[in-house]
Every structure is written in structure tokens, then in C-alpha cells.
Image: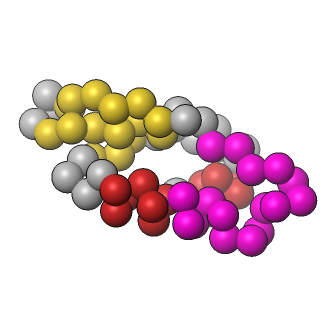
Amino acid sequence: MIAKSFSTEFGKPCIWIEDLYIKDEYRGLGIGKKFMEFITNKHADCIFRLEVEEENEGAMKLY
């Protein structure tokens, strides 16, 4: 799930990546990477914001 807003800090549109969940059986297949490539290409004029819990090592590697 993403949310689009405007960043006054950077003076341009901002995409918040709110939730990205991939079922266990599909992890490690490059789906997360493909999502990140798609979203950054689709919204190339934006900055991206997200939060990741420290213990979520898989997400940390992806981002």
C-alpha cells in the first residue's frame, strides 16, 4: 500500500510506502525488488519514505 503526499522538506511529491507484505512461499523470488523498481519508475518525480522495524532484516536488505 502506498500513499502520495507532498514533502515541504524536499519541495516535491512524496510516496509513502505504507505496507509491503509478501507471503513466505513467495519471498526470495525478487517480487519486492520488482515492486520497488516499478514504483520508483512510475513515480520518478517523487521522493520515497518508508519505515522498517530493525528486526525485519529482509525488509532492510530490500530497501
Question: Residue 47: where, in percent of width, then height?
Answer: 27, 47
**Residue drawn at 35 percent across, 46 percent down:** 48
* Quadrant location of the N terminus in the rendered image: top right
Q: Nearer the viewer, residue 26 or 56?
A: 26
Is residue 28 in the magenta section? yes
Question: Residue 35: where, in percent of width, then height?
Answer: 54, 58
- For residue 40, what is the image quadrant? bottom left
**Residue drawn at 21 percent across, 38 percent down:** 13
Q: Nearer the viewer, residue 11 or 25?
A: 25
**Left or right, 5 with reference to 51:** left
Question: Residue 8: where, in percent of width, then height?
Answer: 14, 28
**Residue drawn at 41 percent across, 36 percent down:** 16
Question: Going by the picture, which residue comes out furthest to the bottom?
Answer: 29
- For residue 24, what is the image quadrant? bottom right
Colouring used for the render:
secondary structure
Question: Going by the picture, which residue comes out furthest to the left?
Answer: 11
Vertical position of residue 33 compared to residue 53: above or below: below
Q: Nearer the viewer, residue 8 or 32?
A: 32
**Left or right, 20 with reference to 22:** left
Question: Residue 14: where, in percent of width, then height?
Answer: 28, 38
**Residue drawn at 60 percent across, 36 percent down:** 19
**Left or right, 48 with reference to 32:** left
Which region is colored magenta?
20-35
Question: Going by the picture, which residue comes out furthest to the right?
Answer: 25
Q: Nearer the viewer, residue 2 or 49?
A: 2
**Left or right, 39 with reference to 21:** left
Total marks shown come to 0
Is residue 40 in the magenta section? no
